[in-house]
Image (cartoon, rainbow, N blue to C red):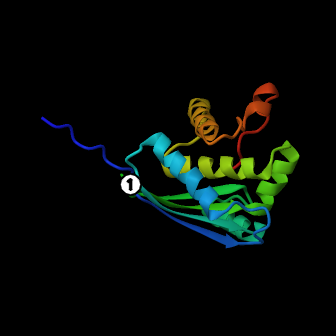
Amino acid sequence: MTEPLPRPSRRLNLSVQYACNKDGLPSREAVRRWARATLDAVDADRGGQVTVRFVEPDEGQELNRDYRGKDYATNVLSFPYDTEPVVMGDLIVCAAVVAREALEQGKPLEHHHAHLVVHGMLHLQGFDHEDDDDAEAMETLETEILAGLGYPDPYAAEKDSPAPRVQD
């Protein structure tokens, strides 16, 4: 009896939108690589339809206020759609907040963008950090995915001196 051929990964339909100045923002190819690695880390058979939108602080603040009741621009917002088994949703990345955080944390901007896209993609797949156990599991997975992409542990500094977790 012959073995069945392995199923290829499902397709990632990714739209990347730049609704702000593109200076310092990751390329569509980089965002695709980060999103695909995150989907594959959770389930290689999962596909997805995802929009990643890089926005100015006013749009990020408006969305955060309207959908989460928090009146400030945050680094990343995740809007998952209930479409199991395919991941569908929108990620809103506030470029100015990400740039400010990268500078404050002494991280290369690309590394911080990669971290937040991975972080947001995990939210679209049902991961959260509402309690310590969930946060630890999510952070461990983020760190593993980023290491596989060649990025350092984004939480390394926090592990040495505790600081607030990713604000989303």
* Residue at the extreme top: 160
Question: What residue would you read off at disc 1?
Answer: 10
* Residue at the extreme front: 2
Q: Residue at x 70, y 60 (%)?
A: 26
Q: Quadrant of residue 62?
A: bottom right
* Residue 13: x %, y % from top left: 46, 64
* Residue 144: x %, y % from top left: 59, 34
Identify which residue, 28 or 78, lies in the foreground: 28
Residue 29 appears in view:
yes
Q: Is residue 166 left or right of residue 144?
A: right
Q: Quadrant of residue 64?
A: bottom right
Q: Residue at x 79, y 67 (%)?
A: 23
Disc 1: CA contacts within 10 A as few (<14), some (14-19) or many (>=20): some
Residue 130 appears in view:
no
Instruction: Identify the element where label 1 is drawn.
Output: loop
Q: Is residue 155 left or right of residue 8?
A: right
Identify which amino acid the numbered label 1 is placed on: Arg
* Position above or below: 155 against 5: above
The mark total stands at 1
* The N terminus: image quadrant: top left
Q: Residue at x 35, y 50 (%)?
A: 8
* Residue 32: x %, y % from top left: 56, 57
Identify which residue, 81 or 11, lies in the foreground: 11
Q: Is residue 160 left or right of residue 141?
A: right
Q: Residue at x 63, y 56 (%)?
A: 30
Identify which residue, 145 or 119, lies in the foreground: 145
